[in-house]
Amino acid sequence: MQNSKIKKKIITLIGPTACNKTSTAVHLIKKFQISIIGVDSVQIYKRFNIGSAKPPQEILGKYEHHLVDSADPENIFSVKDFYDQAHRLVIQAHSNNRIPMLVGGTMMYFNALFKGLNDIPEGNEAIRNELQQELDTRGVDKLFNDLKKIDPESAKTIKENDKQRIIRALEVFKISGKRISDFKKETTENIFEEFDFINIGIFPSDREILQARIRERIVEMINMGLIKEAQEIIKLKNIPKNHPALNSINYKEAIQVINGELDASELEEKCVISTRQLVKRQITWMRSFNFSKTFDINSAVEIEKYLEEQIF
């Protein structure tokens, strides 16, 4: 006899930056018994507010967003951390008779949910600090050349100035004696296979409207005090130099202004360009995902109707 156990559902709301995902999620939580779980590698951190376009405190206070504004920036929140915590929160939501809805634009996190994670070793602070020191004294070119020797396959997929990923690949090799590219080839088990995913994709049809939204959002961030926020973050004593959030869009450019590497008058344009590039990468990722249904920006009512038919 076939196993007829009905899988519990997970809704995902996936879209590039500046596509009204937060306002759509808030619209839906007013209508349905759902639990919002953030899927954003920068919004997860406390203090990273303006530059990450984190929902304002009045929204977070009224409608709980799990995994938003919850991690201390002194630590690095990894993909594995997200995977494990999201699983715990999904189970918690179901036990409270709510359907978990994972909302965001960090595609690496969504990829982990759909495909599982390899057994790549956790970070080692001593080794990472040693590599960071080598980066500071000998430069990124030296580290990239080391990577080319030990793991030429990874070196082909990592940009030669991507300090974070170069350090991570070298760190994995130093910890395990095994190349990160070999880990990635191994078969993975996925704890999320037991769930039925309703994947909703937001694909902006009018790029000009999206470009205008991006610029409007950047201007607002700068006016709200993006540079001041970045200054306060880099003053934190225990934040690692190689913290990925410091290298994320808007913060990276603001820190360049603080360090005198970028003129303040160029900040808006530089952030706009970086955001456009991010959107392109996000949409490329999204094309590799399987969606139950896709929508344009500002389709909260249509998404509500669709979920009503499918689940509620």
Image (spheres, rainbow, N blue to C red):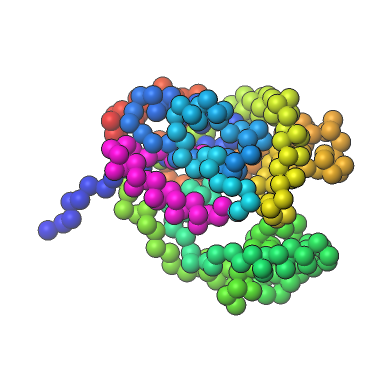
Comparing 242 with 213, the one in front is: 242
The spot of residue 63 in percent (x, y) is 44, 29
In which quadrant of the rendered view does residue 124 lie? bottom right
Q: Is residue 12 above or below residue 302?
A: below
Tell me: 135 left or right of 114: right
- Is residue 23 in view from this perspective? yes
Q: Is residue 19 visible?
A: no
Against 49, residue 127 (above or below) is: below
Give the residue drawn at x 49%, y 40%: 38
Q: Residue at x 39, y 63 (%)?
A: 189
Q: Quadrant of the C terminus?
A: top left
Name of the residue lying farthest toward the left: 1
Q: Is residue 48 left or right of residue 10?
A: right
Q: Which residues are magenta?
A: 77-106
Q: Quarter-wise, where is residue 263 in the image?
A: top right
Q: Residue at x 55, y 29 (%)?
A: 57
Assess whether residue 297 is covered by the magenta stretch.
Answer: no
Instruction: Give the percent coordinates (x, y) of residue 161.
Output: 75, 57
Q: Compared to 273, does 31 lie above or below? A: above
Q: Would you identify the image quadrant in which residue 122 lies?
A: bottom right
Relative image position of residue 196 (x, y in whole percent): 32, 46
The residue at the far front in this view is 237
84 in magenta: yes
Q: How many marks?
A: 0
Q: In the picture, which quadrant includes the N terminus? A: bottom left
| Residue, far top | 301
Residue 233 lies, in percent from the top left, at 71, 42
Q: Residue at x 59, y 43 (%)?
A: 45
